Amino acid sequence: MKNRVVSGYRPTGRLHLGHFHGNLKNMVSLQESHDCYFFIADWHALTTDYRDTSKLAKYTSEMMIDWLAAGLDPDKCTIYRQSDITSIPELVLYFGMTLSLGELERCPTYKEQLRELDSRVVNTYGFLGYPVLMAADILIVGAELVPVGEDQVPHLELTREIARRFNSLYDGIFPEPQPILSKAPRIPGTDGRKMSKSYGNYIQLDEEPGEILKKINKMITDPARKRRDDKGHPEVCSVFQLHGAYLPKEKLDEVDGLCREAGIGCTECKKMLAENVNESLAGFREERKRLEKRPEIVGDILREGSLKVNEIASGYLAEARNAMRIGAL
Ligand code: TRP
Ligand code: SF4
């Protein structure tokens, strides 16, 4: 029996390099060796964007096409949409009964988002319950492994706590899932902060070559390196950081050395990065164009995925209800 893996993405539209190196690349290789379940977390999108739901469908299709173009293959993994899985909310209800408000309020992502987003919008029951929904996503398919970004680790800790509590209160059967973290370095955006849709500092996976070069050219390098013959400090340069995702170790060390002795100029260094990024995305762009001509595959994949996952999920839900003596006479 292969280990079961689950991961979800909120539908935010087109994916960028941060998604790819941070997690998607991992998912593509895991489908070869594990029993993988990858879903579009549209209910999670509602936790912050419940007022305007008009783009959900478009973002769901766009993201699914990006997944496929990046190499997720419905013959090797199961792809589905959260809102098609009818057992999830019932599990959320049971888990919610067992958690204290403090446990949810202490969650670092909750505290951070409450500070960063408009607190009038996210000061809701649904938003506080985000990790409960995530735990149900994972446990409803009995997953043991969860490929995620570093920021999601506290959510997984809480998921394990939820599983342990359920198991000990009701003699349940949920496994305690572990994260799989990417080995890739942190992917900086074009402004040096973490690459993110909300910062507007991203390079999309379907970005055209000219646009890639333009964005990389605008990146800030070592601020102390004003002239071509100034020696550079690659450790403070986000161009160098991004090179880390593309160059093998020896090549990276070579660029490091050249930068330090002013053997390479920033323009040239950026051009090399743009070429490598561009080359690595060529296959993706081509595949995406091919898939865009067959938009009906999105619905086909979701239908098949939800049939399969609903069957698994209703099995786990039935066991949970049984353990809790819900619906018994
Ligand atoms: N919280 C995750 C994120 O923001 C998305 C997500 C929702 C998820 N449910 C999940 C990831 C279950 C892994 C497993 O990236
Ligand atoms: Fe950054 Fe490259 Fe310029 Fe060095 S040469 S500062 S690594 S862009």
Image (spheres, rainbow, N blue to C red):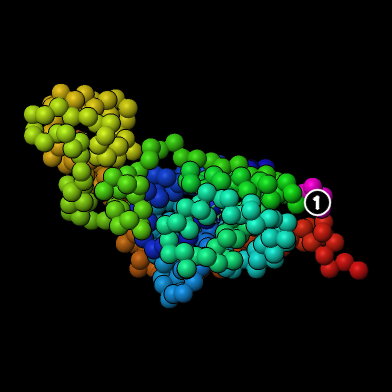
Residue nearer the viewer, 280 or 217: 217
Residue found 19% across the figure and 25% down from its top: 260
Name the image quarter holding the N terminus: top right
**Image check: 270 left or right of 59?**
left
Q: Is residue 128 above or below residue 149?
A: below
- How many numbered tags mark residues here? 1
x then y, percent, for residue 223: 18, 37
Highlighted range, magenta? 167-173
Task: Say which amino acid is labelled 1.
Answer: Leu
Residue 168: in magenta span: yes
Quadrant for residue 292, please give it: bottom left
Which residue is depicted at the point 13% across and 30% down?
264
Quadrant, the C terminus: bottom right
User: Compared to 28, does 119 lie above or below?
Assistant: below
Residue pointed to by mark 1? 169
Percent position of residue 187, x then y = 35, 43
Residue 289 in the figure: left or right of residue 265: right
Whether residue 286 appears in this view of the structure is: no
Where's residue 300, x and y in %? 51, 68
Single out the residue that lies furthest toward the right: 329
Q: Taking 247 as reference, is 13 left or right?
A: right
Q: Is residue 6 magenta?
A: no
Q: Position of residue 253 (x, y in %)?
A: 27, 25
* 279 relative to 67, above or below: above
Disc 1 residue crowd, few under 14, some 14–19, many 20+, Cα 10 Å = few
Q: Is residue 56 above or below residue 199?
A: below
Secondary element at tag 1: helix
Taking the spot 20% from the left edge, 55% from the top edge, the residue there is 211
Q: Kindly tell me whether residue 94 is visible in this rendering.
A: yes
Quadrant location of residue 225? top left
